[in-house]
Image (cartoon, grey):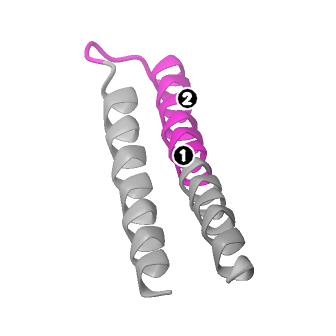
Amino acid sequence: MVDKENQKPKKQLNNYIKFSGIAFQMIAIICLFAFFGVWLDGKFPNNFSAYTLIFSLLGLAISMYFVIKQVTNMNNE
């Protein structure tokens, strides 16, 4: 009985670590794509900051794909 009681808080802590890691991964992907878009806008100027907008949204889509993939993998375990 003691082992089961100790496992529950440890499992919850592992889940918190996994989800916080997913959040940092999302932030890193979106920031990398946004900075690349800003760099492209500086290199090839335009009126609407199109590269920043496009690459920020692309980074958001890619990070959401990774989040969904990781959460479904965690759910299957």
Badge 2 density bin: few <14, some 14–19, many ≥20, Cα 10 Å: some
Callout 2: SS: helix
Q: Are marks 2 and 1 in contact (CB under 8 Å)?
A: no
Badge 1 density bin: few <14, some 14–19, many ≥20, Cα 10 Å: some
Q: Amino acid at mark 1?
A: Ile
Task: Check residue 33 for magenta coloring.
Answer: yes
Residue 23 lies, in percent from the top left, at 52, 45
Question: Is label 2 or label 1 in front?
Answer: 1
Tell me if 13 is positioned left or right of 42 in this view.
Answer: right
Q: Residue at x 49, y 76 (%)?
A: 74
Depth check: give the residue in front, 24 or 35: 24
Depth check: give the residue in front, 23 or 15: 15
Callout 1: SS: helix
> Taking 17 as reference, is 44 above or below it?
above
> Taking 37 as reference, is 9 above or below it?
below
Residue at the front extreme of this rendering: 1
Numbered badge on residue 29: 1
Q: Residue tagged by mark 2?
A: 35
Task: Check residue 8 for magenta coloring.
Answer: no
The prevailing secondary structure element of the residues shown in magenta is helix
Residue 61 lies, in percent from the top left, at 33, 53
Residue at the left extreme of this rendering: 48
The magenta stretch spans which residues? 21-48
